[in-house]
Structures are given as structure tokens and as C-alpha cells.
Amino acid sequence: MKEIVSLAGELYPSSKVIISTPTPRADNESFNMKGQLISVLLKQEYFDTEEVYLCDHSNLANKGRAVPRFLCEDDKYHLSDQGVNVFAANIRDIVDEALDLPKRRPFYNSNVNLNNGSRGGYRGRGGYRGRGGYRSRGGYRGRGHNNYNNYQSRGRGYG
């Protein structure tokens, strides 16, 4: 690995190298442990190297064991569709970091309506509809208190 990284540095001095760590496996515990060991050794070897970035796939596992939904049920070492999605996101994130691009917003945090127009079961105060909690400046503050600053100056506000 060192030879490949040094050769890449010689041939392309302004480039950066991204090394992908092994993905977890559930078919053979020995192979899975060897993959974890390789990941640890790579992290140790390239910890302080500025031109080498490691794409860590430990989020495909929990406590060292592969998360079943990320692996194909047939062989337990190829990635499932969900596993490929996580794998691709890991690579995308490390490429963004290597190129010093701004962090992307997670999909679940975007303004995309994921429930096809359904408002969901919870309709209480707070949430994304703008009413806010007790610390927000908008929403319900009680009868007779229309001015936020006036409400705060009476010592009854929480914000």
C-alpha cells in the first residue's frame, strides 16, 4: 500500500489519495476480523498524512459485527441496496472532504416531503410548522401578552 501511495505522489504531486477500508462481512468471522485489523492498521499508518484520506465504512457495522440489512442475504458479504447507499455516501463524504467542499445536508434533514403529502400522526405544538416551543419568539404566549419584549420584561418569559 505504501508503494502505491508513494508512486501516486510521485506521478501526481498535487493529487490526493483516498483509500477505502474493507466493508464488514457476516459470512466468516475470521475474514471480518481481518478486515477490521486492516482498517485499524491503515488508520494508524495514514493518521498524520495530509495527502491520504481514508474512507471508513465502520458505519456498516455495529460493535464490529456487520449490520444484516446492509448485506445481501444470499452470501452475507456483498452489500445490499441499503449497504451500497451507505457505502456511496461514505465515499462521497470523503471526496468532498479531500476537495475541501462544503458539507452536504443529510437527505433526512432537507425540505423534501418524505410521506407523500401525509402530515403524520402528531399535530401538537412545535415541529416544522413554525409554532415553536416555549423558547421560540412566535406561537402562543398566553392571553393578553402580544408583545414579546413586554412579556420578557415581566419576568415570565423563558427565552
Image (tube, rainbow, N blue to C red):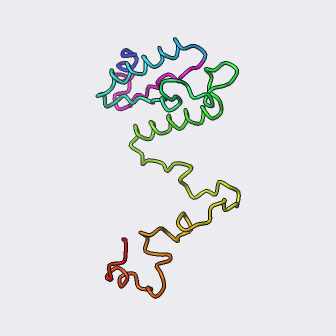
Give the total of numbered labels.
0
Q: Residue farthest to the left?
A: 48
| Quadrant assignment for the N terminus | top left
Classify residue 53 by image quadrant. Answer: top left
Q: Residue farthest to the top?
A: 30
Location of residue 82 with respect to 146 vertically, above or below: above
Location of residue 73 with respect to 106 vertically, above or below: above
Return the x and y of residue 153 as percentages of the image width and height.
31, 82
Q: Is residue 88 magenta?
A: no
Return the x and y of residue 134 as percentages of the image width and height.
44, 70
Foreground pick, 26 / 92:
26
Foreground pick, 148 / 23:
148
Q: Residue at x 34, y 79 (%)?
A: 152
Q: Residue at x 34, y 28 (%)?
A: 13
Foreground pick, 114 / 51:
114
- Tell me: 46 left or right of 29: left
Q: Residue at x 65, y 29 (%)?
A: 80
Q: Is residue 15 magenta?
A: yes
Classify residue 41 by image quadrant. Answer: top left
Location of residue 125 with respect to 15 vertically, above or below: below
Q: Residue at x 42, y 17 (%)?
A: 37
- Tell me: 130 left or right of 121: left
Q: Residue farthest to the bottom?
A: 144
| Quadrant assignment for the C terminus | bottom left
- Tell me: 126 left or right of 134: right
Return the x and y of residue 23 as percentages of the image width and height.
53, 24
Location of residue 57 with respect to 150 vertically, above or below: above
Q: Which residues are magenta?
A: 7-26
